[in-house]
Image (spheres, grey):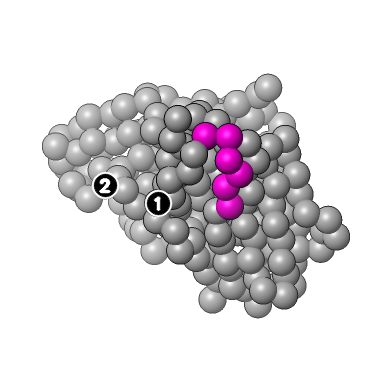
Amino acid sequence: AQKITQTQPGMFVQEKEAVTLDCTYDTSDPSYGLFWYKQPSSGEMIFLIYQGSYDQQNATEGRYSLNFQKARKSANLVISASQLGDSAMYFCAMRAPMNRDDKIIFGKGTRLHILP
Amino acid sequence: EPEVTQTPSHQVTQMGQEVILRCVPISNHLYFYWYRQILGQKVEFLVSFYNNEISEKSEIFDDQFSVERPDGSNFTLKIRSTKLEDSAMYFCASTPGGPQHFGDGTRLSIL
């Protein structure tokens, strides 16, 4: 069965520090995609970053990077130089197999609080 | 940058009434989805739609739910007889293949 686990329900981080949000996943499909979404208090879902299971390098998008450790089935999101506007709920998500455009399954999320 | 557009942003409906949630996916996208998020909980898949038919649906998506693409741009979710437990944020998403792009959601409140 496919599963996404986010073990940190909430985190408090000082502004300008780097933060790592944990995500582990489980799937038997060799081809899968991993995603991170940000949900501010206003409720919308904002796509942040994507990692394919066959990608050789870790994905990066501006201040976001994905620390992909395939053997450990982890896909942690790293936010460098955190800002007050990064305070939000963050969801790790997966689609497997990747060659079908089927549903994404989400983790329960981590609520990130950036402190001034 | 093109966006997925959802209307209305907030819908308040009496229990037992029908409700239609509307979405305009990004124009060159081929795959469409509905998800819901009960307050404080994780996002749950409802249904995926491709080539004018449902490609997958979850156990949540029972006979009270239906989806339609009535023209070339709109994608709707209908709940026939709403229940209190249908209160949630409903997200539409679309993709050409790859990451799904979500709309801002419709908050549905059932009274």
Q: Position of residue B46 (x, y in %)?
A: 44, 53
What secondary structure prevails in the magenta region?
loop
Is disc 2 placed on a helix, strand or loop? helix
Residue at image point 31% right, 48% down: B40
Looking at the image, which is closer to me, B11 or B76?
Answer: B11
* Up/down of B10 relative to B41, above or below: above
Residue at image point 44% right, 58% down: A8
Is disc 1 placed on a helix, strand or loop? strand
Residue at image point 69% right, 52% down: A66
In-image side of B17 versus A106 (left or right) = left
Stretch of the chain drawn in magenta: A15-20
Residue A98 lies in quadrant: bottom right
Chain letter for the residue marked with disc 1 in the picture: A
Magenta stretch contains residue A54: no
Which residue in the structure is indicated by mark 1?
Answer: A10
Which residue in the structure is indicated by mark 2?
Answer: B86
Q: Position of residue A87 (x, y in %)?
A: 46, 36
Q: Residue furthest right?
A: A56
